[in-house]
Image (cartoon, rainbow, N blue to C red):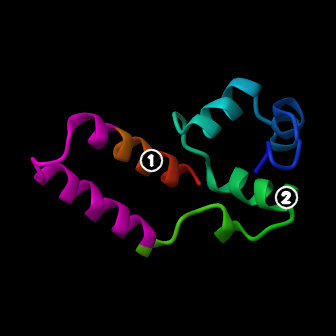
Amino acid sequence: MREKRNVTQDALAKHLDVSRPTLIGYESGKQSINVSDLYSLADFFDIEIYDLVPSLEDIKKLSSLEIALEKNENIDVEVKKEIKEFIKEMRKE
């Protein structure tokens, strides 16, 4: 969303009152964002907080897909890797 709206990491980090490395951690999924920053992020982009987090139903679907993927031995290892990466990216959005 930040990139789509041409917002720099520095500008968004300043708005959230976090360091740029912290923001990078949020964006990469390596660091969890706190609820307060979620509300601030929603305010910054003028959206609802629910637009920033997946629904419980979506999370369950992704989890079920991961379980099925692990159990299926007929899927090529590289394809499994790509699917897992896709799921990881979907969780970020």
The image shows residue 54, relative to residue 34, as above or below, that is: below
Residue 15 place in picture, x, y as percent: 87, 43
| Residue found at x 36% / y 61% | 62
Give left or right: position of 75 versus 5.
Answer: left
Residue 31 place in picture, x, y as percent: 54, 36
As for residue 78 lying within the magenta part, the answer is yes
As for residue 64 lying within the magenta part, the answer is yes
| Residue found at x 55% / y 49% | 92
| Residue found at the far top of this picture | 21
Residue 53 place in picture, x, y as percent: 58, 62
Residue 48 is labelled as none
The image shows residue 63, relative to residue 89, as above or below, that is: below
- Which residue is disc 1 drawn over? 86
> Mark 1: which secondary structure?
helix
Dot in front, 1 or 2 = 1
- Which residue is disc 2 drawn over? 45
Residue type pointed to by label 1: Phe
Look at the image and give the residue range highlighted in magenta: 58-81
